[in-house]
Amino acid sequence: MQEQRKLVDGLRGGQAYFQQLARSVWRVQEDERRRIANELHDGVGHNLAALIHLVANARAALHAAGDPAPPALQALERAHAIAESTLQDTRAMSRLLRPQILDDLGLEAAMHWLARSSLETRGLDVRLEFRAPRAALDGDRATLVFRVAQEALANAARHAGATRVDMRFDGGADRVRLEVRDDGRGCDLEAALARGSAGASAGLGGMRDRARLFDGSLQLDSAPGAGFTLVLELPFADAAAGAAAGAA
């Protein structure tokens, strides 16, 4: 009996170690996303803005000289349009990698921004209901909730053909719950997850693995013609720590 107890304790210790290691890897990935997003915004973005300003000045100088020089003006107009488009793409990429609003204003503001941007960029009508938790989520869990919502909306737009998404976030006594439901075409969920390599199933499968890292769960439900529903449940850090201590 004592040997069995030692074996169980050893397995639990190994599981906790690998869970902590996986969390550390995930944090490193998020830190790298943040670094690249800042570089795109503060470095590349600022350089593109300066380039747009220079092109605009050159265009104005040609006009002021009284020599329209159509070929030169056309080239400058084209350069200006390309630079403007590239700047917008760079800013959008920076926000997708790591929206600054999540770090500056928190999860609620970031979720509302995500809902608005999904309408602007993907045409998704996202109805968000947000009930704040009893206390602010720690950074890891707030990021996870945001990433799951982001992946669910991407799935609704790219794979489900949805036009409307209902998203509800509830903060309970010891855990938070995110439910995302779309009106898309749905799918044979077991077959999609079994394939595992295609975009939707791979992305959502990855989110499920990340939920487990923080002692949470991610439930998926879908059927052909019945839309797609995702439910994330995530305990607060203190509740998860208490459960782990009780299990030990």
Image: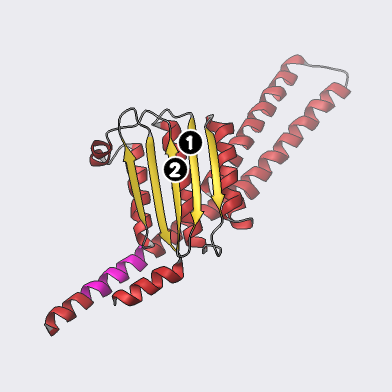
Tag 1: amino acid: Val
Left/right placement of residue 216 relative to residue 192 reads: right
**What kind of secondary structure does the magenta stretch mostly adopt?**
helix
Q: Any mark on residue 165, and which?
A: 1
Whether residue 4 is visible: yes
The residue that mark 2 highlights is 180
Q: Is residue 142 above or below residue 160?
A: below
In the rendered structure, which segment of residues is drawn in magenta?
A: 10-22
* Image position, residue 38 (x, y; %): 59, 52
Circle 1: element type: strand
* Image position, residue 134 (x, y; %): 55, 63
- Residue 216, by quadrant, is bottom left
Whether residue 93 is visible: no
* Image position, residue 176 (x, y; %): 46, 57
Q: Is residue 15 magenta?
A: yes
Q: Any mark on residue 182, and which?
A: none
Tag 2: amino acid: Val
Q: Which residue lies furthest to the bottom in this view?
A: 2
Using the image as rendered, state which of residue 247 and residue 170 is in the foreground: 170
